[in-house]
Structure formats: C-alpha cells, structure tokens
Image: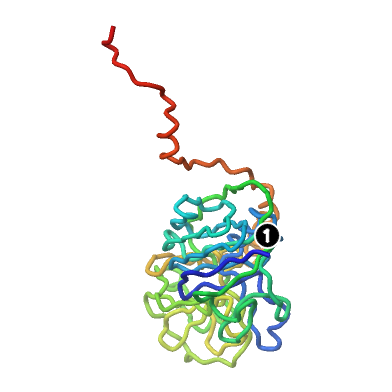
Amino acid sequence: MSKLIVDRVGPATSVQDAGRHGTQRYGLPPSGAMDPLALAAANALVGNPLFAAAIEIGPLGAAFRARGAVRIALSGAPRPADISDRPLANNSSATLQDGDVLTLGVARGGVFSYLAIDGGIQGEPMFGSLAVNARAGLGSPYPRPLQQGDEISAPFASDAPDRSIELPAASERPIRVVLGPQHDEFGDATQSFLDAEWRVSAASDRMGYRLEGESIPHLHGHNVVSDGTVNGSIQIPGNGLPIVLMPDRGTTGGYPKIATVITADLGRLAQTQAGRGFRFKAVSMAEAQAEYRTMAKRLRGLPGLVHDARSSWLDLDALHRANVAGTAVSAFDG
C-alpha cells in the first residue's frame, strides 16, 4: 500500500465523490463534487469508476508527497502543476515515484481541480459516500477539509502508461435556469434578475454561492414556509442578493426561490471565479431535461476520449550532455 502525504493545502480541499443520495429526508445534504464532469474526467484517466472519490482542490495551491509509487490524474480548473519540477499538464495522468512531490499552484480560469488516484481513495463510506461535509462531520478518510500531515492511502501504482483526455473549452453562454418555484413572489423583478449581470462573491463556499449585483425586491416579504431545496436553488434573502445553493446546502429553506440552475450548468457555475461577471437565461423544463440527457451521454463517453499522453517535457541538461550535433567545426577550415 502506498500513501499520498499532504505537505501543503488550502482551506477548501477535501475528499469528494458523487455525493450521498437518499439522505435528505434525514436532513443530510448530498455534498459531493462541485464539478462532476471534472471529477469524472480525472477518474477516467486512471481507469476508476467515473464518480469514485477523489481530492477536490480549491482555488489555492497544494502539495502532496508520495510514499511508494502512486498513479494520479489531474483535471478541472487549469493551474500550474509539476512533479518534482517536471511539468504536469492538466487533464492528464502520471505516476509519482517514492519521494516525488506533486506541487499545484493557484487556479487560473476556474476554481476546483480534481486529483484522482488509481484504484480510488481508501475510506469508510458514511451513508454510502466518502464525500466530506465539514459542517455535518461526515466524510472519510477525514470528515473535514484536508490538513498538512494527512495521509491518503492508495494501492501501489499500476504500470499503466501516462494518459490524457481532450475536453472542450468551457462555454461562455449564460447560466441556464428554470424559473420558480416562487418566482411569482418577485413580479416584474424576475425579468430584472434575468437582465442583470451578476458576480460571485468572495464570501461563497460549498454551501452557497452569494452573488453581487442589483438587489431584487420582494413583493410580499422575504420569508416563506420552509420547503425543500435542491442543488442550484436560487434563494433571495432579505437583502435581495441571490444565493445559489450548492452541494453542502441545507435540505430546506425559508427564503423564496426565484429560479433553479439546471443540472447541466451547475459545474460551470461552480467553476466561475469570484468577481467574474455572468448572466442567467430562463429555459423550459423540457430543455433542462434534454440538456441533462446530453450531459449524461457526455459523461458516459469520457473513457472513450482517453488516449496515451504525448509528453512535451525535455530534460535539457541530458540533451546537452548527449552532444547530438557532434563536434562543431568552422566552415572556413580547409
């Protein structure tokens, strides 16, 4: 058995999988990966089930040290990455040898990255999942965000070759929503919600993305009888600024919900960096369902997109020592 030792880590890094389902009736939110597509891509690169547990890495950097050989894959938000000073490309796999250090920089153009381990993360499922929910004290192997010194057990690396996967660039189109269930509590302000440009607040987290922009007024006050929520529910609290509920949300809420982000766009919203502007677009329930089916087909097709990696890394010192050009002479010598 090998191990991945946490040398350095930011505050928003934890073990996540597809989440725990069937527990909301007990008041337990699903948790799970903020960007399921990136989680699935990382797992596909090392041959794991698509939604096996992996390390979800927040916007700040991290460093991990191998004890024994560990085969890993990285996907999600682009960021600088290297293995003991050898560059590691995003959306690719590699093998860490004993003592190697994987160093990850700050995310660029996204928020969350996923580090999958060949053979999966070892842990004790809690309500059918390893997904961490720190507020509820759930998750495994640690029921909290990762800290320096934590050890992640892993099977000894297989001899599989390095792989990569080609994923399309993230769309720049508006985040699509289905209006309701309480959009009638806002009257004409519903159109203002759709017309406005919004920005993700730096105060956002895995429980909810707080948005900054023009306040949305309520017609009848900001309290309703508490009812169920889902991932992507958009609540409008008393200050009129929307909160998009994310995987660690509460299972019920008492603020009116103006709309719900469609499942196919939730990962894209989760990868929106704080301060970056975006808009919402209302779609029909039929369109939301069609986009979900397209997303499911895309997920199933990920293993077929994996191919052997084409490394562009060169050891320049070794190239100089090889003297591949032979002995240089002057063209003017007789």
Neighbor class of circle 1 (other Cα within 10 Å; few <14, some 14-19, many 20+) is some
Q: Is residue 91 left or right of residue 119?
A: left
Task: Please provide percent x and percent y for residue 273.
Answer: 42, 66
Figure label count: 1
Q: Is residue 303 left or right of residue 270?
A: right
Classify mark 1: helix, strand or loop: loop
Task: Please provide percent x and percent y for residue 161.
Answer: 64, 46
Task: Please provide percent x and percent y for residue 78.
Answer: 47, 57
Determine which residue is flagged by label 1.
156
Against 42, residue 216 (above or below) is below
24 or 61: nearer the viewer: 61
- The single residue placed furthest to the left in the displayed view is 332
Against 224, residue 247 (above or below) is above
Residue type beneath disc 1: Phe
Against 121, residue 73 (above or below) is above
Q: Quadrant of residue 327?
A: top left
171 or 66: nearer the viewer: 66
- The single residue placed furthest to the top in the displayed view is 334
Q: Quadrant of residue 155?
A: bottom right
Task: Please provide percent x and percent y for residue 55.
Answer: 58, 67
137 or 177: nearer the viewer: 137
The quadrant of the image that shows the C terminus is top left
The quadrant of the image that shows the N terminus is bottom right
Q: Residue at x 34, y 21 (%)?
A: 328
Against 58, residue 160 (above or below) is above
Give the colouring mode of the picture: rainbow
